[in-house]
Image (cartoon, rainbow, N blue to C red):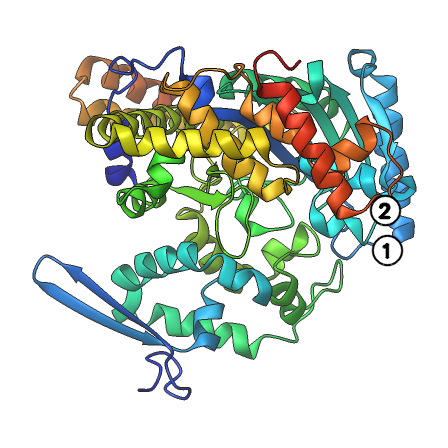
């Protein structure tokens, strides 16, 4: 049986996902499976469980949209692109499982972001920010945190608190545009 | 993932009855933060010269901060094999570090008996890693310490940061908060029960990675598992800490449940198992490290379940860290040309002295 992604190689990993009445089959070859992970080859088999878990998450959401195939293609076409700051190319990044510098993330955004999304499940930092960050980023983070809080307050129907949070957001947003 | 998360995070804290036993199931906590400096290449592709410049820079900063003067500096380059092995066991260096030692250094502050440590690691996978290791289940305390140490650096150094990706790390696995919380759990009953598959699945669902702490040929040795958070981006630091705490309490409950059930269903079997291990420990003349771990794990279980006598209460994690080859060689100042059999025989004596009543 051929791989569902590259149609070329023999599929060696067969996954069957049963959810309620729906049965979904995924056949994938070793090479393509590797592209779903961000691990060097030797790490790959150690982390198989984790990769499969991630893989299932991807497959259920995006399998039919063809997004995965696009990711795979962009990885294979762009292997020789280099980061202008540190000089590392995509091929090396994939081989060692590490980027070369902080600029790599913006330079290879198109390739790395989908991978990061599949590893982390999110592309939105909700953690703390360095003290010496610009005021603008701090303000944005504040607003984002408040929006998150607002959403939760609405879910638990704490409307009084939600109204207060909404006003805070409005005030901060006004601040942002004034600057 | 949020929907699934609540599965494990339902309020078990109040239900948990394991206050006194919790540190006998969760043996060790480690929290670490990763940071990189702006305007420097990451260490994966740095030249040795660049690494040395960075090492000097960070070293100078640390030495200037008076709150950090209890930390002692070690240059990895000048260490012997045994010393490196010890650091590796204390989580202070990664195995890959053994080969490429140029430009790497670390500041360490040990607490009592080496079970507690704080460390600042320079030029490993990331420019800077700040780590705190505590005995038992102590996530908040360890987290507060790493954040405290980070503050000193934050004032003087500029960290690579992106508003979407958070703190930028060499590997995308650590992006965001770059915070990794890991605990070591002793799960002698869950590990052999039929529920282990479900247990692992449950942990994966809530975003945890579980691995054997010591691995033999694909087998976990000594029933020790390392459990850590998988996701570092898209959650706040406090969320990660609170989630991991809740997950640990659930792990404790699961193990205790399994122990209770086993005791009810097969008391004779478990007693037999424990006393067989006891017999081996008491009379064996040669004990490999792996075998010792297995036997001590079962004896520890016997103590926890209150079904063994003639044995001193001992700290499993502390003891296994004293009986590794490297620890024996270093602590007893034995020449490193000692044969394996000699080491195994010293180990057998050492364990007997520690755990048999009346032989200290």
Which of the two residues, A80 or B45, is positioned nearer the viewer here? B45
Q: Residue at x 50, y 31 (%)?
A: B279
> How many C-alpha atoms fall within 10 Å of the one at disc 1: few (<14), some, or many (≥20)?
few
- Determine which quarter of the picture holds residue A154: top left
Horizontal relation, residue B103 to residue B243: left or right: right
Do the residues marked 2 and 1 share a common chain? yes
Disc 2, SS: helix
Picture coordinates of residue B216, whole percent (x, y): 55, 52
Above or below residue B111? Residue B48 is below
Q: Quadrant of residue B38?
A: top right
Total marks in image: 2
Q: Position of residue B227 (x, y in %)?
A: 46, 37
Q: Quadrant of residue A14?
A: bottom left
Residue corresponding to mark 1? B47
The spot of residue B54 in percent (x, y) is: 85, 40
Residue at image point 50% right, 56% down: B218
Q: Which numbered disc covers residue B51?
A: 2
> Which chain letter matches label 2?
B
Residues at marks 2 and 1, CA–CA distance in whole angstroms: 6 Å
Judged from the image, the secondary structure of the residue bearing numbered disc 1 is loop
The quarter of the rendered structure image containing the C terminus of chain A is top right
Q: Is residue B69 left or right of residue A111?
A: right
Could you tell me which chain the residue with mark 1 belongs to?
B
Specify whether B154 is left or right of B15.
right
Residue A53: image tag: none
> x%, y% of residue A65?
28, 69
């Amino acid at each position: 049986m051929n791989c569902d992604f590259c149609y070329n190689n023999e599929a060696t990993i067969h996954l069957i996902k049963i959810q309620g009445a729906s049965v979904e089959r995924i056949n994938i070859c070793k090479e393509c499976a590797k592209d779903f992970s961000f691990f060097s080859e030797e790490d790959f088999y150690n982390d198989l469980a984790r990769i499969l878990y991630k893989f299932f998450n991807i497959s259920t959401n995006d399998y039919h949209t063809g997004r995965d195939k696009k990711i795979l293609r962009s990885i294979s076409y762009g292997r020789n692109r280099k980061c202008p700051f540190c000089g590392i190319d995509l091929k090396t990044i994939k081989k060692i499982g590490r980027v070369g510098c902080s600029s790599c993330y913006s330079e290879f955004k198109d390739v790395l972001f989908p991978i990061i999304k599949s590893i982390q499940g999110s592309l939105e930092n909700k953690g703390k920010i360095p003290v010496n960050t610009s005021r603008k980023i701090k303000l944005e983070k504040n607003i984002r945190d408040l929006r998150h809080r607002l959403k939760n307050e609405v879910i638990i129907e704490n409307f009084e608190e939600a109204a207060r949070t909404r006003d805070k957001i409005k005030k901060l947003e006004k601040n942002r545009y004034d600057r | 993932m949020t929907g699934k998360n609540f599965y494990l995070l339902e309020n078990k804290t109040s239900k948990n009855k394991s206050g006194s036993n919790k540190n006998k199931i969760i043996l060790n906590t480690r929290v670490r933060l990763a940071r990189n400096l702006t305007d420097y290449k990451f260490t994966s592709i740095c030249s040795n010269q660049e690494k040395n410049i960075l090492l000097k820079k960070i070293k100078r900063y640390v030495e200037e901060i008076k709150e950090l003067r209890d930390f002692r500096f070690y240059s990895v380059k000048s260490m012997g094999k045994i010393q490196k092995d010890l650091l590796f066991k204390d989580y202070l260096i990664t195995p890959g570090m053994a080969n490429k030692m140029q430009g790497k250094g670390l500041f360490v502050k040990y607490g009592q008996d080496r079970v507690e440590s704080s460390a600042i690691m320079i030029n490993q996978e990331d420019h800077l890693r700040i780590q705190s290791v505590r005995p038992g289940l102590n996530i908040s305390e360890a987290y507060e310490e790493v954040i405290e140490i980070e503050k000193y650096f934050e004032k003087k150094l500029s960290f690579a940061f992106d508003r979407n990706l958070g703190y930028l790390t060499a590997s995308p696995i650590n992006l965001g908060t770059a915070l990794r919380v890991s605990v070591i759990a002793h799960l002698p009953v869950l590990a052999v029960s039929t529920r282990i598959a479900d247990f692992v699945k449950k942990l994966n669902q809530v975003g945890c990675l579980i691995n054997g702490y010591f691995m033999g040929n694909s087998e976990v040795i000594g029933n020790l598992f390392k459990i850590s958070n998988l996701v570092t981006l898209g959650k706040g630091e406090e969320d990660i800490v609170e989630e991991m705490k809740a997950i640990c309490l659930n792990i404790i409950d699961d193990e205790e449940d399994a122990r209770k059930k086993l005791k009810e269903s097969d008391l004779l079997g478990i007693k037999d198992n424990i006393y067989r291990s006891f017999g081996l420990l008491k009379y064996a003349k040669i004990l490999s490290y792996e075998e010792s771990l297995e036997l001590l794990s079962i004896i520890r279980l016997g103590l926890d379940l209150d079904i063994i006598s003639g044995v001193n209460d001992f700290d499993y994690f502390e003891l296994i860290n004293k009986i590794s080859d490297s620890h024996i060689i270093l602590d007893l100042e034995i020449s490193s040309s000692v044969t394996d059999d000699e080491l195994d025989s010293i180990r057998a004596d050492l364990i007997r002295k520690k755990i048999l009543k009346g032989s200290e």
